[in-house]
Amino acid sequence: MAEKADIHELYEKSVQAVDVEAEFLRDTYRALRGRDPLSLREDFCGTASLACEWVRGGSRRHSIGVDLDADVLDWGRRHRVSRLPQAARARVKLLNDDVRKVRTDLVDIVGAFNFSYFCFKTRDEMRRYFARVRQALKPDGLFFLDAFGGPDASDITKEKTKLDGFTYVWDQAEFEPVTGRILCHIHFKFPDGSKIKRAFTYDWRLWTLPELRELLEEAGFSKARVYWEGDDGEGGGNGEFTEHATGTADPAWIAYIVAER
């Protein structure tokens, strides 16, 4: 089964819910700005599923996806953009470029999701990236990022999740307390015993919310709000995010940061 599996399809089934994410972007922007956002730039877009989902939401919407990996962008063109109606395809632009250097039209929203921006390991690198994002936003634009943390985030551990036809394994393989470096892998296991080991590997810094908010302000953003995930009553998240001033002392959490230009 592993030989026939597509790691990009498996990844999306495991960690993405682009319809829910697109709704959160729209609703949050609408609440803060009093109008519907029309333009989205998805940094570290990978397969560009969110960029494609965005244009499905309205004929006036358009999106830009930016990623350094030409192969995964090509996969996205063949498997995601191609599935859009013909008219919608023209409203998605995919760029094989560095998010720190790319120049694009000004947009309502820039999003950096799935913690991909954790690849920047120094304050200077992160601040420069944030400053470039700010330059890409319209005057009332918003920058959306996700983050994770809590005591469990620095544990050396494997978390297995059974899904339809396969098991998703999140592997926190290494953590360095002095540097904040974290090395993580994604593996996939199948009912026939076959496996895809290290389908994806992430060499990141585990950033904290105070650090990120401070860097956003240093980069020129006027405010950085945090949206905290609610509790499902069984110790897990319920997928609903609301603005929160302090957060809660959860062993593992996921949050969004929404920065106002």
Image: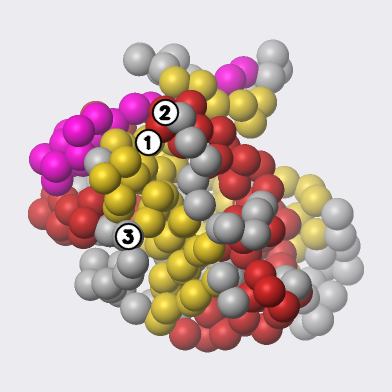
Res 140 visible = yes
Comparing 244 with 182, the one in front is 244
Q: Residues within 10 Å of mark 1 (few under 14, many from 20)?
A: many
Residue type pointed to by label 1: Val
Q: Which residue corresponds to the image point at 65% horizontal and 54% vertical from the top-left?
A: 58
Per the rendered image, the range of residues in magenta is 212-231
Residue that badge 3 annotates = 106
Q: Quarter-wise, where is residue 41 in the image?
A: bottom left
Label at residue 258? 1
Which quadrant of the rendered structure holds the N terminus? Answer: bottom right
Residue type pointed to by label 2: Leu
Q: Is residue 97 magenta?
A: no
Q: Which residue corresponds to the image point at 61% horizontal and 26% vertical from the top-left?
A: 240
Picture layout, residue 221 above or below residue 165 = above
In-image side of 13 versus 71 (left or right): right
Residue type pointed to by label 3: Leu
Q: Position of residue 31 (x, y in %)?
A: 48, 27
**How far apart, in angstroms, are the residues tagged by discs 2 and 1?**
10 Å
Picture layout, residue 73 above or below residue 192 = below
Q: Residues within 10 Å of mark 3 (few under 14, many from 20)?
A: some
